[in-house]
Amino acid sequence: MTPYSGSPGPTDEPPAATADVEAVFERIDDGVFALDADDRFTFLNSHAEELLGVTEDAVLGEPIWDVFPGASGTTFEANARRAMETQEPVIFEAYYESLAAWFEVRLYPDDAGLSAYFRDVTDRKEREEQLEAYETGINAAADLVYRVDPDGRFTMVNDTLVERTGYARETLLGAHVSTVMSDDDVAAVEAHITTALNEGDDSPAPIEFEVQCADGERVPVETNLEILREDGAFAGTVGVGRDVTERRKRQRELERFEETINAVDDVVYALDDDGCFELVNDAAADLTGYDREELLGEHVGIIKDDATVESAEEKLRSLLAGQSVETTFEFPLQPKEGSDIPAEDHMTIVYDDDGSFTGTAGVIRDITAQQERQRKLSGLVETTQDLMDAPDHRTVAETTLAAARDVLGFELSTVRLYDDEADALVPVASTEMVRERMDDRPTYAVDEPPVGDAFQTGEILMADDLAAIDDDADRSPVQSAMYVPIGEYGVLVLGATEPDRIDDLDRQVAEVLATSAATACNRAEREAELREERAFIDGLVDSIPDIMYALDEDLNYIRWNDRLLEATGYSEREIENMGPLELIADEDVAAITGAIEAILDGGRARAEARIVTSDGDRIPYEFTGAPVTEADGTVEGIVGIGRDVSDRLERERELHRQNERLERFASTVSHDLRNPLRMAESNLDMARHECDSDLLAAVDGAHERMEELIDDLLALARQGQTVDETEPVSLATVAGDAWEHVDAPTGELTIDADGRLDADPQRLLQAFENLFRNSLEHAGPDVSLRVGTTPSGFFVADDGPGIPADERDAVFEYGYSTTETGTGLGLAIVEEVFSAHGWDVRLTESDAGGVRFEVQT
């Protein structure tokens, strides 16, 4: 049913309408307009004119899409087309951009056209959007939001409450709050609301209770309540509850933190960014004398002087500049009353969550005891050094006593040392106060308490109240004492005029002091022994006729005997500033340098060189040296001896001249004797052709005898020469070679020698040949010989008849022989060979009863 429908008449005037119908449409609050089948306006009531901003006269007969071109293509056109096509009413809401408004539209079609009823619902839509946003916000809130009616039943719950409790929304809506609260909490909240109602307070203070979840978990919440009223009557409440589990946890942690910092003996504080106290623990009141309330809010300058505050601010600026995160400094703390207290402040920076500086926090410690301990320990270190320099026990006792008085502060102190002859503890050092205020201190037997007990047990004995000791000793004015054993050397007695005066620090320092004193006594004993030993060694070293010296690893002289000064003519000071090579002739430096390098490599060395004295004289010396090594074998120096070989070299030169004379003599003798002998042998051969006589055989034997004598005399002359050069020789090899040179087909030689010795191999070979021939001549061709070594050399023994003891000294004399054919020079040559080597030889009896020649090399 439409107010106007159909097309306009020929005069373009709308069809007539009754006055009643128009009056009805004017009374409707909605806007009403009608369109004909060609979408032309046929009617608008006054509300439509107002809402659309047009007049009826201006739009009647005009197509709607021309009047409102912005409506084309909109939801209105689509729904209008649909209504006309379906001839079914269409109701919808839409926003019209051109009118900037929301409209609720109802379209009624018929064959003649379309009637539209519409109203502006912009305000309602905005309220709905606000409500929707409000509900969305409530549901998105992290807090638990709810509303209950006057009977305490839920009428609204947000998503957070549903999720946190685990109950479905349908379960909670209409349910009593006791579903999620205990009876006690329900009663407490009801009482809280009743009080608020009675006081007319619609926003009472927050209240805490626990929410009981579906799974049994209990969640503590702090809830803000708002009283709802309708016409002044109570209409329920709205609640916003916040989970305070973490807050309670933090609160408990804070309580524990406060308990902890209050249990700390040091001052714990926090300052704001202006340097005012925000937090202090109980220890602050104890140390500063100020109550906590007096400190909180006050500037830190209340306990620090201006210089300390300025220094602390400078350190804070360094911290803020990123140089560090914390700092520690000492300062004089100014208490409320009394003198300054030495203190140490360990300060760090405090930042908030966004990294902004909010102040500082730190710990202040009373370091009075620490400084006193440091003072005592520093004094103890100095005392220890003095103790180590003490030359004897009495000096140790006096130094220990001074430390007990000056470092530990005990004016009543005595040191007793053990006297082994008296078997007692004798007072050897006492402080001035002891001497002035106490009688002469007695000597205690080692088993007499309390001093003797400490000495015998080796443990510190504390006497907190001397009056309790049951003996007749007068110890006044001392009322407490400590008896500290000084090892096996004595006891340190420390006394005080008050009972229980001695603390743990005193005990610790006194124990270290006594231990150092015992070490010093032991060191003094060893030093005395070392001085005696050094004096003895110095006497021995200075009595050595040769030069003795010691060098460090840098070849500096560190020790020498008087002979070095005498030999060189230099003074002690001059030797101290000289190196060993400065005493050596230039042409001999290479030899000494090589020897030094060999010694520094860990070996021994020998070298000859000439010393240049302070007067420029050159004296030949033979130097022998050996390394001085540490436990790990590292060479740390050289020790050596230098022997003046002037006389030896002169003897060697004389022997060389003598050897040359002997060689000339032997050659002369050999020539002068052999020539006549050759003529005699020629004449003998001629005589044998002219006649045949037994006397010619005798003459021939005499000639052979003369030949042997000449050979032996020549050998004797040559063997008597001094051996100039030697080389390592195998004793077994030389003995074996000598045995092959003698004619002994049925004899036997056993060699038990595997050593080597320095010798002239040819001359040693001659000596062995003579010894073997001697045994063959006296023991026969079947003789058994043995060559072996001894600790001091070697021996040659046979199983022949031997030589009587009273004739053994004569066997080495020239011409001694027990056979008619012997020359008596064989063993003399043997002795000459051994003597030329510097060896000794003697004759004894072998195990088989024969002879045994023992050679000491």
Image: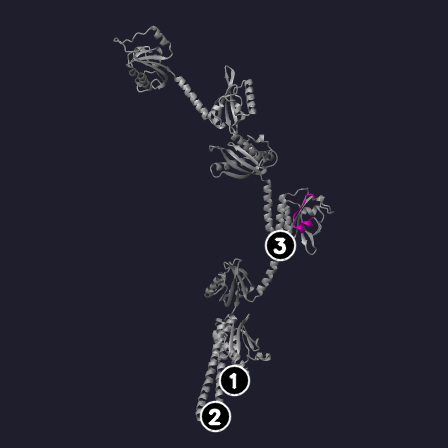
Quadrant of res 264: top right
Residue 35 on the magenta span: no
Marks 3 and 1, Cα distance to the nearest angstrom?
79 Å
Provide residue 440's location: percent of width, then percent of height.
71, 49
**Residue under circle 1?**
821
The amino acid beneath tag 3 is Asn
- Rendering colour mode: one colour
Residue 320 or residue 758, whichever sits in front: 758
**Residue under circle 2?**
693
Q: Residue furthest left?
A: 10
Q: What segment is highlighted magenta in the picture?
A: 450-465
Q: Relative to 225, is 50 above or below?
A: above
The amino acid beneath tag 1 is Thr
The amino acid beneath tag 2 is Ser
Confirm whether residue 299 shows in the render: no
Provide residue 651's location: percent of width, then percent of height.
51, 73
Q: How many marks?
A: 3
Provide residue 163's location: percent of width, then percent of height.
47, 27
Task: Name the element at disc 2.
Answer: loop
**Residue under circle 3?**
522
Confirm whether residue 692 shows in the render: yes
Residue 464 on the magenta span: yes
- The reply, left or right, for residue 110 in relation to residue 356 is left
Task: Please report whichever mark, 2 or 1, sits nearer to the chain's N-terminal start.
Answer: 2
